[in-house]
Amino acid sequence: MSLSGTLQEVFTEEAGLAVIGATAGHPTLRPEAHSEAERQLKQKLDSRLMPTLVAICLMNYIDRAAITSARLQGLQTDLHLTDVQYDTVIAILYASYCPAQIPSNMLLNYITRPSFYISTCVILWGITSALTGITKNFTDILACRIFLGLPEAAFYPGCMYLLSRWYTRKELGLRAAILYAGLLISYAFGSLWAAAILGTMDGTVGIAAWRWLFYIEGAVTVSIGFLSMWLLPDYPDNTAWLSVEERHLAQLRLADDVGEADADPQEASLFEGFVMAIKDPKVYLFILLNSCEILAMSFSNFFPTLTATLGYSTTVTLLMAAPPWILPAIVGLINAWHAGQSGERFFHLAIWWWMTIIGYVISLTTMLTAARYCSLFLMAIGYSGMSCNMLTVVWVANSIPRPPAKRSVAIALVNGIAGIGNVVGSYIWKASWGPQYVTSMLIALTAATSASVLAFVIRWVLIRENRRMELQELRILQGAQHERIEKAAELGGVSFEEALRRRKGFRYLY
């Protein structure tokens, strides 16, 4: 039986006279059928939304990191770039990428068609990536990297916000992990792809292999962008490929999760969410945490260069750069699933950072090939905590769940401003510091340690907030929060008192 048919059977009015969507009263869901209906809805979303986002995520990293593989095959020489200019080309992307995330997510919260908005940005960065192949000098490639950062800014914070509009707090971690697994696989797949193109297409129709790399990857990204316009959903109240019954259940699930409707007050302005977000101290702690995480994991942007210190040819180096990313992709999915089941956040992040710290220590103490390659695996496994962005951004969404306007800005602030870690990280892996990169690894190791400390502080703050809520649960709720609870009651077909009872069950996840 289809999901729509299941819902039409299980959604009934209290009088048993009409299905969901009737205007005469509020429908209720028979308890015995709720789980099955919800399971079918999630299955439908997972089969369409998640593969699309993973494919976009795959190309997002491949397009951004193609320059590191192209460097091994002559990009820096052909464009006459000094080491400082090359580092600047890496860093300049984040100068546009980071600040653009905040207005992008603010706008996304008020756009009714996020599927069109995100897909258009994918197409634009695909075109920009392809144009990198025709660059002739430092100015040309600098301009391409600046303009690449603008449309890319819509993706990570935008897709995390979109996921938070469809999945509950405990479901969000696993979906973010699936998305981030796509990124980790792209680290491996991107190296293999680059090895194939760079190894076979040099001089084809008189074009250098590194230029073909940008042309091919950009064309694939544009194609995925056009498909995404049809595949991605919009919001639970207006997605065309869901029935009325399915849209209602999607809204009801999120209302039940927190005890408030996932909606902004009708009178809310575009900037109200921004004001609420910057007033929340937790946002600043998360920004510092994510900045340290990104700096600690900045080696990923130079992974082929670090692998090259083992002393092998370009093709072998790119092939050896792939395996270290397979393990964290698998472990990361298991880690995120368990984080969702347990509701715990701190240790599911910090344990993997500690593994990265061990990897740095090994690299700092030896240049033996086997030990050095092993250290690359340990460094990469830090991503099992989805450290750079995803699980941390999930933690942000869990810690600042309502209203949506505030959540969208908080996600963008944490992901955007914290991108300063990428800017700094672009300059700490200087070629002149190789092949041991002692200074680079000491900086990254310090950042990883700082991230662990900050995560512990956030955990303590959230525990304290939970205790405060326990003392305030009997207070009368007023204003916008009262309005959202009334909306949740309306969606669920229950009294305000019942919705308030559900609201009392909300606690921060730490």
Image: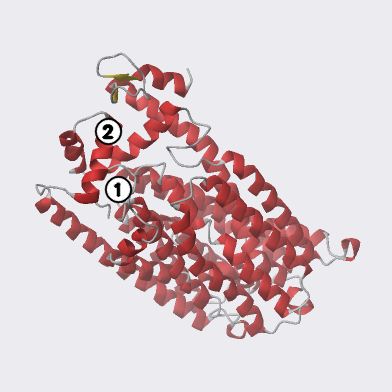
- Where residue 477 sits in the image (x, y, percent)? 16, 48
Q: Earlier along the polypeptide chain: callout 2 or callout 1?
A: 1
- Where residue 492 sits in the image (x, y, percent)? 28, 31
Residue corresponding to mark 2: 490
Would you say 443 lies left or right of 14 here? right
Q: Is mark 2 on a helix, strand or loop?
A: helix
Is mark 2 in CB contact (under 8 Å) with mark 1? no
In the image, residue 163 sits, relative to residue 151, either above or below, namely above
Please name the residue shown 25% across and 15% down the image: 15
Please name the residue shown 22% across and 63% down the image: 461
Would you say 6 lies left or right of 372 here? left
State the residue in front, 156 or 337.
Answer: 156
Task: Place residue 369 in its image quadrant.
Answer: bottom right
Would you say 98 lies left or right of 207 here? left
State the residue in front, 483 or 381.
Answer: 483
In the image, residue 478 sits, relative to residue 36, either above or below, namely below
State the residue in front, 457 or 322.
Answer: 457
Residue corresponding to mark 1: 343
Q: Is mark 1 on a helix, strand or loop?
A: loop
Task: Count neighbours of disc 2 (C-alpha within 10 A) and say few if under 14, some if 14 to 19, many if 20 or more.
Answer: some
Distance, label 2 to label 1, CA atoms, is 28 Å
Where the C terminus falls, by quadrant? bottom left
